[in-house]
């Protein structure tokens, strides 16, 4: 791991109390995920929500899952932020 990566993970752990091993685990899951499969995407959304320690409503989860599985993700940051806001 480079010094830059170590610094990023140290900041994540300090600021958000996120374990770097959990980030690697999620990254590996994303790398191999079938984003057209609702069950896979729903599990990933829940894992990310737990990792961030931020609960999302069932309706918001459904909206995110539908957007991802239908390959209808926003292309700009403002639209993406609106999608993930509670």
Image: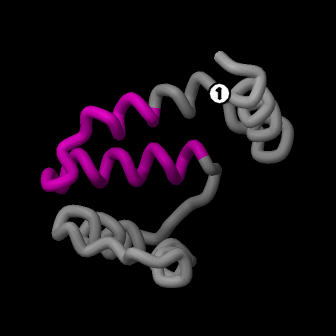
Depth check: 75 or 81 in front?
75
Whether 68 is among the magenta residues is no
Q: Residue at x 14, y 55 (%)?
A: 36
Q: Which residues are magenta?
A: 26-51
Task: Indicate the quadrant containing the N terminus: top left, top right, bottom left or bottom right.
Answer: top right
**Up-down: is 76 above or below 14?**
below
* Residue at point 50%, 72% (across, down): 84
Magenta stretch, main secondary structure class: helix
In the picture provided, is 57 more to the left or to the right than 7? left
Using the rendered image of the protein, determine whether residue 84 is visible from the camera's viewpoint.
yes
Instruction: Tell whether position 40 is magenta.
Output: yes
The secondary structure type at the circle numbered 1 is: helix
Callout 1 crowding tier (Cα within 10 Å): few <14, some 14–19, many ≥20: some
Q: Is residue 81 above or below residue 71?
A: below
Percent across and percent down for residue 49 are 52, 53
Return the x and y of residue 41 as percentages of the image width and height.
Answer: 27, 52
Q: Which picture quadrant has residue 23?
A: top right
Please tell me which residue lies in front, 35 or 42: 35
Residue depicted at 64% across the width and 50% down the height: 53
Considering only vertical position in the picture, is 61 above or below 74? above
Residue 86 visible from this viewpoint: no
Is the C terminus in the top left, top right, bottom left or bottom right quadrant? Answer: bottom right
Residue with the most extreme right position:
14
Write down the residue under mark 1. 20
Q: Is residue 84 above or below residue 41?
A: below
**Residue 61 at x, y = what percent?**
38, 67
The one nearer the camera, 60 or 21, is 21
- Position in image of residue 64 (x %, y %): 35, 69
């Amino acid at each position: 791991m480079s010094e830059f990566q170590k610094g990023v993970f140290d900041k994540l752990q300090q600021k958000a109390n996120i374990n770097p091993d959990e980030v690697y685990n999620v990254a590996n899951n994303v790398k191999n995920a079938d984003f057209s499969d609702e069950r896979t995407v729903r599990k990933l959304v829940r894992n990310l929500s737990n990792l961030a320690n931020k609960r999302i409503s069932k309706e918001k989860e459904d909206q995110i899952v539908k957007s991802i599985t239908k390959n209808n993700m926003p292309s700009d940051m403002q639209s993406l932020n609106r999608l993930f806001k509670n």
